């Protein structure tokens, strides 16, 4: 296929008549921001997670920024996060003024290794910020233990993990704060959008101040804040999707099982695992192409793309492995050999809920053909 036309994209953004209807309702209401749709969106986020509070903001990155700021960190305070994540996780730490350190991951589930995180704790550490990467919860009990032992705050970056569970508990209800993204390609989406969920009343109050210029009452500034408000237009796009989340997740799970059933056993190809105590939101279905595979990762990717499969690399390097971070005074880089190696091995296949059965078969056939010597 010349130019590698993508027949099957990695993500499909679809909105239907319910979203259109609600957006029109907002446009006609004259309440375009921080109005009743945002309130409804927050209620739905509480239902999704089981958390007492949900504070809507304009994206998943600002959700992380205010979650950090609500902890009133001092210069030099350190946040430990995963070496393998999207840049937003790291950018939010730097935006908040804190110092970032990185713990290595488990190659099997791509998530922060709790023992590696515990090893990095110093007297400057204030926050553990694990990521539920690709939609699978990290080892929350191991990480919570370390947080409790050292009196650290916990912020879960759940941007990719809407509705995922750990020990039968939905992510977003832990002892600290959790943040979700509603960016257009996430499992639930509002174009741009974000939310912080927490059970902590004082943190929730502070988060509400921070997103709206530090005001509880108009022109009474209590802290220096931001304008991180979500619009009612964006909330109206997301609202009709919440009742569909269970179906979205089960369609993604069925696609993931189909791929794993049909791709396991290929030489040097490692299919993703779901840990027994977790459910996976399957934001991404990510293979590892190891040195035992007769074809290199980059060649596998090229062939998939040429066959029209919108496969992609999430993520091509460890999160800090760019000059802008390597030269940053508040980025502290140690040894993360697993994250750095895994970044050279990953390939994600389209797994979204809009795949047809024939598209699934095309993806499987293209994957078989792409890994051949
Ligand atoms: C998408 C994402 C974010 C940021 O969310 P935005 O809404 O795009 O700002 C943060 N962390 C992870 C892991 C993400 O995937």
Image: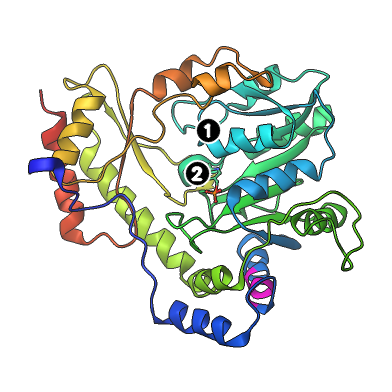
Q: Residue at x 75, y 41 (%)?
A: 68
Q: Residues within 10 Å of mark 1 (few under 14, many from 20)?
A: many
Q: Which residue is mark 1?
A: 111
Specify whether tag 2 is near ligand 1 (CB below 8 Å). no
Q: Residue at x 45, y 26 (%)?
A: 107
Q: Residue at x 30, y 62 (%)?
A: 354
Depth check, front residue: 20 or 248? 20
> Quadrant of the rendered structure where residue 284 is?
top left
SS type, badge 1: loop
Decide: marks 1, 2 in contact (CB < 8 A)? Answer: yes
The tag on residue 294 is none
Q: Is residue 60 above or below residue 94?
A: below
Q: Residue at x 53, y 46 (%)?
A: 278
Majority secondary structure of magenta residues: helix
Q: Is residue 338 above or below residue 281?
A: above
Depth check, front residue: 232 or 47? 232
Q: Is residue 266 visible?
A: no
The tag on residue 136 is 2
- The region drawn magenta spans 37-41
Q: How many marks?
A: 2
Quadrant occupied by the N terminus: top left
Q: Is residue 219 above or below residue 264?
A: below
Q: Residues within 10 Å of mark 2 (few under 14, many from 20)?
A: many
- Is 40 a magenta residue? yes
Q: Earlier in the sequence, mark 1 or mark 2?
A: 1
Quadrant occupied by the C terminus: top left
Is residue 280 rendered to the left or right of residue 329? left
Q: Position of residue 372 (x, y in %)?
A: 11, 28
Farthest front residue in view: 219
Per the model, the C-alpha gap separating discs 1 and 2 is: 8 Å
């Amino acid at each position: 296929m010349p130019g590698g036309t993508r027949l099957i994209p990695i993500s499909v953004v679809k909105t239907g008549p319910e979203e259109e209807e609600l957006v029109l309702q907002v446009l006609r209401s004259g309440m375009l921001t921080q109005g009743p749709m945002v309130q409804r969106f927050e209620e739905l986020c509480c239902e999704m997670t089981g958390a007492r509070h949900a504070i809507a903001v304009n994206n998943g990155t600002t959700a992380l920024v205010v979650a950090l700021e609500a902890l009133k960190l001092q210069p030099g305070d350190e946040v430990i996060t995963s070496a393998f994540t999207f840049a937003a996780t790291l950018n939010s730490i730097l935006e908040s003024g804190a110092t970032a350190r990185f713990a290595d991951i488990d190659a099997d589930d791509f998530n922060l290794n709790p023992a590696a995180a515990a090893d990095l704790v110093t007297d400057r550490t204030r926050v553990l910020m694990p990521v539920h990467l690709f939609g699978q919860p990290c080892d929350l009990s191991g990480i919570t233990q370390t947080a409790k032992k050292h009196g650290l705050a916990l912020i879960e970056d759940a941007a990719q993990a809407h509705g995922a569970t750990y020990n039968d508990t939905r992510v977003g209800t832990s002892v600290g704060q959790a943040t979700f993204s509603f960016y257009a390609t996430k499992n639930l989406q509002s174009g741009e959008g974000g939310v912080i969920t927490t059970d902590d009343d004082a943190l929730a109050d502070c988060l509400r101040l921070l997103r709206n210029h530090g005001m509880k009452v108009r022109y009474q500034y209590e802290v220096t804040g931001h304008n991180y408000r979500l619009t009612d237009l964006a909330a109206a796009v997301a609202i009709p999707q919440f009742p569909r989340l269970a179906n979205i997740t089960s369609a993604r799970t069925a696609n993931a099982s189909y791929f794993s059933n049909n791709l396991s056993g290929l030489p040097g190809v490692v299919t993703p695992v779901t840990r027994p105590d977790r459910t996976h939101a399957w934001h991404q279905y990510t293979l590892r192409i190891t040195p035992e595979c007769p074809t290199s990762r980059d060649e596998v990717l090229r062939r998939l793309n040429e066959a029209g499969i919108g496969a992609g690399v999430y993520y091509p390097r460890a999160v800090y492995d760019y000059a802008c971070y390597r030269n940053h005074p508040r980025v502290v880089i140690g040894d993360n050999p697993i994250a750095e190696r895994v970044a050279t091995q990953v390939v994600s296949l389209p797994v979204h809920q809009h795949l047809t059965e024939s598209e699934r078969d095309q993806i499987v056939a293209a994957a078989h053909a792409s890994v051949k010597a």
